[in-house]
Amino acid sequence: MRQLTGMDQPYPIAPEKLAGAPAPRPRLGKLCVAVQAASPREMMDRASAALRDSRFLEFRLDWLAKPASVLPLLAEFLAAHREVTAIATCRRKQFGGNFGGALTAELEILRRAAESGCEIVDLEVESAEEAKPGQLAKFRAGLAAAGAALLVSFHDFSRTKDLEAAAARIEAFAPDFVKVVSTARSLADNLAVLRLIEERSLALHVVAMAMGEEGLLSRVLGPRAGGTFTFASFAEGAETAPGQVSARTLIDLYRFEQLDQATRLFGVAGNPIAHSLSPLMHNTAFRRENVNAAMMPLRARAVDDLLKIVRELPLAGVAVTMPLKQEVLPYLANMDPLTARIGACNTLRTGADGKIYGFNTDVAGVVRPLERRLRLRGAKIGVLGAGGAARAAVFGLVEQGAEVYIVNRTHETAVALARKAKAKALKHAQLAKQQFDVLINTTPCGMTGSKQAMPVEANELHARLVFDMVYNPLETPLLKLARERGMAVVSGLEMFVQQGARQFEIWTGKPAPEAEMYRVVELELRRRRQAEAAREA
Ligand code: NAP
């Protein structure tokens, strides 16, 4: 039988608070926006702005030089916004906060915050343990009189270990809310956090998450596992904890409000991964096609860590990026013959049998844009570069019956790839004399930040169509020159979208909304470029 505590049993609300109240406060939302600021006025301005995302706010009083100075403004704000539920936090420095005062001062500020209308106060477990029994009892009586609930929190800023013991320490105080926060060092740490939530949320109000980039899953999925709520920042750059994401990112990008038990979860895995465009592209496609699914970035340092999450969370599929495309191969139950020959897999799908199947959709990323524009059988195609991306292009195009010539800075690598893929290797010096139907750049030349702008000299560019895999910038120097010469062009963005479209088909069995996927990724690339330019100016 499920025991009810905290929010299920209404916690004490002072009669004077109820008298004349215009409307009852609604129950807690699942998303609490943490508000920090440098001044009381800024804190209240940010709180007002945060209301566009949530009616549930945490006020990090410890971020202010004088935490008590904001309380009159806070009281005014909460009286004016009766729909808002507020948490007050004034964490001391030694426990990961910014408040330099002593325990007595912290308790006093929290009690006054409760009197100012905050319905929940957060007290770190170390402070609860440090307080004398009489002192704690008096503090709790003050909260009860003000109608506020007590949340006791634990933070581990270095690892995820012994979460059960941390929860037990908190539960010794029988608070209304139990909050356990650790630091993720691996993806598997999310599993420990989500298990703690699943087990304890049957009897208690539990909030748990792992900080750090690897802990993102726990932040997004905590409430789905039974957690009472999760935290988000007011805006990008205003995080109150490592790895916290903004409320808008949670809602718009990770589909936080749509997640339920039936949601199929996907990831894009690699290292680094934070700037991957795949979550934006796929979550847009899922939304557009009414697929109950969500994709999140997974910072994976090791393939066994990724596979543990795939099996145990579980994940329905993963987009795999560098450096894991080769490393996953030994763990696959099966893969298509072309993927096996290429020796790199960028897409995982978990079958109904629980086994993991591998695909290489980079091939579709190259072949689809080209077959829409020309007949590939017998076409003469030059490939610049012989790395991972070139392999998918060369094997895929040879399979379509194209005559493929590889030109690479390190000629021996081109020769080795040509031998394996039944293509030909050309020395760079021979390039000027060649006329291709298609010339594909698979080197990073021309990419923002790359020292070399062009993979070929202007007098070496003889093709009907030029395809550049680089998509940042959208128009590379190579594509610009090709356009000026009247050649047809294919951008790296089209490849990115087409390889993603093939992933979408593999995962959902539906045709992908390619135009919409293209539109959002292009828009985001332009937004990033403008932000970069603004930073440089
Ligand atoms: P990779 O495995 O490191 O291979 C890079 C290739 O480029 C190698 O053949 C390398 O030659 C050559 N190269 C590097 N710097 C060069 C230079 N300055 N001049 C001439 N050649 C140079 O990389 P990858 O995974 O194949 O990725 C290559 C590019 O494709 C990246 O820009 C990536 O962003 C892009 N890409 C785009 C998509 C898409 O969806 N649009 C998908 C995959 C990749 P050596 O053998 O001599 O080192």
Image (cartoon, grey):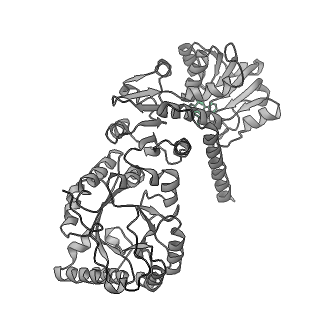
Quarter of the rendering occupied by the C terminus: bottom right
Residue at image position (35%, 56%) is: 209
How far from the left and from the top, in percent, is residue 473? Answer: 67, 43
Figure quadrant of residue 59: bottom left
Left or right of 158 on screen, residue 447: right
Image location (x, y in percent) of residue 406: 63, 20
Is 22 rendered above or below residue 497?
Answer: below
Taking the view exactly as shown, the residue that stands out farthest to the right is 485
Q: Which of the image's four quarters has the N terminus?
A: bottom left
What residue sits 55% from the left and 25% below the top?
392
> Residue 9 appears at what percent x and percent y?
26, 69
Q: Is residue 448 visible?
A: no
Residue 471's image quarter? top right
Residue 36 seen in render: yes
| In this rendering, position of residue 23 left or right of residue 465 | left
Q: Is residue 150 above or below residue 521?
A: below
Which residue is pictured at 26% across the width and 53% down the height?
Answer: 196
Residue 281, position in %: x, y?
A: 56, 43
Q: Quadrant of residue 174?
A: bottom left
